[in-house]
Image: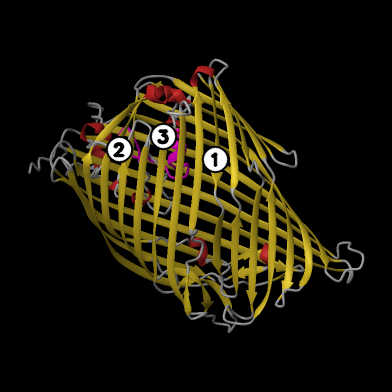
Amino acid sequence: MNLKVPFKLKTSLISLLMLPSLHSVANESNVLVNSSSYPSSFFMQYHPQNAYDMIDRLPGFSFDGGSNDRGFGGNAGNVLIDGSRPTSKSGGLRGALIRIPVDQVEKIEIIRGGKGSSEVAGQSIIANIIRKKDITSGTWALKARRAPDGDLRPNIEAAITTQIGQWDTAFDTDIGGWVGYRDAVIEDKGHDDHLNKTADEILDEKNNWVYINGQGAKEYITGKLTLNGRIGGEKWQGDITRNIIHSDSLTHEPDEFWLLNENNTNKEFELGIDWLGNDDDWKWHILGLAVVKDQNYENAFNQEYFAQNENYNSQFKQHRIKTEYIFRNTYGKIGTDRFKPEYGFEIANNKLDTELEYSENNQPKNLESANVVVEEFRGEAFVTFVYSATENLSIEGGLTGEISQIEVSGDATNDQTFKFLKPRLAANYSFNDDLQLNIQAEHNVGQLNFNDFAASTDTTDDRNTAGNPNLAPNQYTKLSTKLDWGFSEKGSLSVNLFYEWHTDILEYIILPSDNGNISHGLGNAGDATFWGFETDLNLPLDSFIPNGLLEISYEYNRSEYFDSIINQDRIINDYTPEQFNIEFRQDLTEHKIAWGVELISHFTDTYYLVDEIHTFEGNNRIEAFIETTYFDGLKVQLLVEHLNTGEYTRSRFMYEDDRSGNFEGSQIAKRKREPEIKLSVWGTF
């Protein structure tokens, strides 16, 4: 094994940054194994506007945008750009792809089997977008969404890539908003199923935003230097009104009026610096990332009781400052060697500073852990590898050691240190170019949501939740196997089976309190098991529907957890048991028209609180679109969501003290979302 090191590691980073640019970075696609390539011409039948549109039409490929967990290494999706993962978090992988105009894409490579990079570890299929160099191109879009109440919001998007001096640059902006409207009938019943009162509810909501993204890349010090930036914000407003009639009312006029005004704002800034250097043998990747978010959550609630001539009101305000700073360094073998290791480390600092004010009838109220500061220092070191055992078999895996310290201060205090080992091993076998099997085993650690350390309120349900400073991460061991079969140019079948063993899962529990009050919040609640499978089928229908394509996806999920409140097994919170989608599309290229329809299946989610059970159920919903490229240089699409009307039922079942107590009653909200229309026009320049 050749351990030649082309970089002089003893050279300091400062010295590197002072050297002039030398030679361009070799495209990493020369090391990809088991790959097939789709030229940009393949996608022209779908009239894409950007790289994301092209990824969306890749046969047998399901886009994974990754997660937004803290840190960088564990959030990878399954798409690379010129062999590397985009250095950004807030905008997400989808946002990075939208910023690449279709004219800039030369081809997309599908990589099956291990790639040996910690940035995409665990992905059995990866798409690698290869861009053209030194071109200027751009895209724009005008969109308008109309809610059922007639409210209309425009949306303007624009992106451009160009060469500025030695820099390859890309800029985009997204300015606009959306509106939402639904009505509902809510029935409150007692423990004997007797109807106590009925409410007519209306939700009117809107969201407005402005975001600007920029990227610049140039050759620098035997490698490629990339700068990423993002700035912007958004504001969401929602008004919920209820006219409430008691069942014993003689006039059938409202007995109560209920109003909730909510205002949430988010401002964010992100800056990323990325340097990637490689030759035929080794790749060195250095990354720095800073993210700052300023968030405000406010609501004002008012309830009038007409008969008693009484009024109740409450106000809630919470201000959150979130910061994240990451430094990551990897050094890995590339080229044609059968064994390719990669070594690296990542250090990060994350902080949440939250301040909360809450009052009822203009009198301040104290909530458990209302004002807290949560700060985490985390470091991890890892080694990964890919070994091409034979032409058809590759083995990949790695070991990560993680240590983190989480300190909570303010209204609640705690200081915890966690140490974890996270091994992973996977085997990828290619029976032929069209059929691959992946088997994987890994141990992983979930991430805590810092918001759960602080108190929160849900005014809609008249519920306050205490913060918990003693939370520990959930851990799980997972076994999975995935089969990918591409049986034609557009036809494919993917089946993924998995089984997971979890410890320290997070569920709502009764929290200990210093003042003797009983409070509920999220806590570590024991062990659980998860299992299920996912399948995706792309079925061309050309034999009887010209250029027709049917896409079918199905998810089956099961879980088991022993609930100490009721002393019996149950499913896990917020875990959809089944989901089924069917999408049909036909491209009539000779007429420059495409149309399609999607069926989104019925679903039921269940959520367990200490003293309540919530279910959320949705009907079979239909979306449809028609689009044309009849006008030169333009693509026009009309999309209708909830074509058959979306019907959602939210049910609350309440118990005395906790779910082992006497049943107290229910609240059933039957919600409707009428069809919503979205008109979009895209163009290029």
Q: Residue 524, can we see it?
A: yes
* Sequence-first tag of 3 and 2: 3
The amino acid sitting under disc 1 is Glu
* Sequence-first tag of 1 and 3: 3
Residue 275 has which mark? 2
As drawn, the residue found furthest toward the top would be: 632
In-front residue for pair 583/92? 583
83 magenta-colored: yes
Label pair 3/2, CB-CB below 8 angstroms: no
In-front residue for pair 103/7? 103
Q: Residue at x 63, y 51 (%)?
A: 264
- Residue 268's spot in the image, x, y percent? 52, 45
Q: Which residue is mark 3?
A: 55
Q: Which residues are magenta?
A: 79-98
Label pair 2/1, CB-CB below 8 angstroms: no
Q: CA distance from mark 2 to mark 1?
A: 42 Å
Is label 2 or label 1 in front?
A: 1
As drawn, the residue found furthest toward the right would be: 251
Q: Residue 383, can we see it?
A: no
Q: Which residue is mark 1?
A: 598
- Residue 141's spot in the image, x, y percent? 56, 27
As drawn, the residue found furthest toward the front would be: 544
Residue 360: image quadrant is bottom right
- Above or below: residue 434 compared with residue 318: above
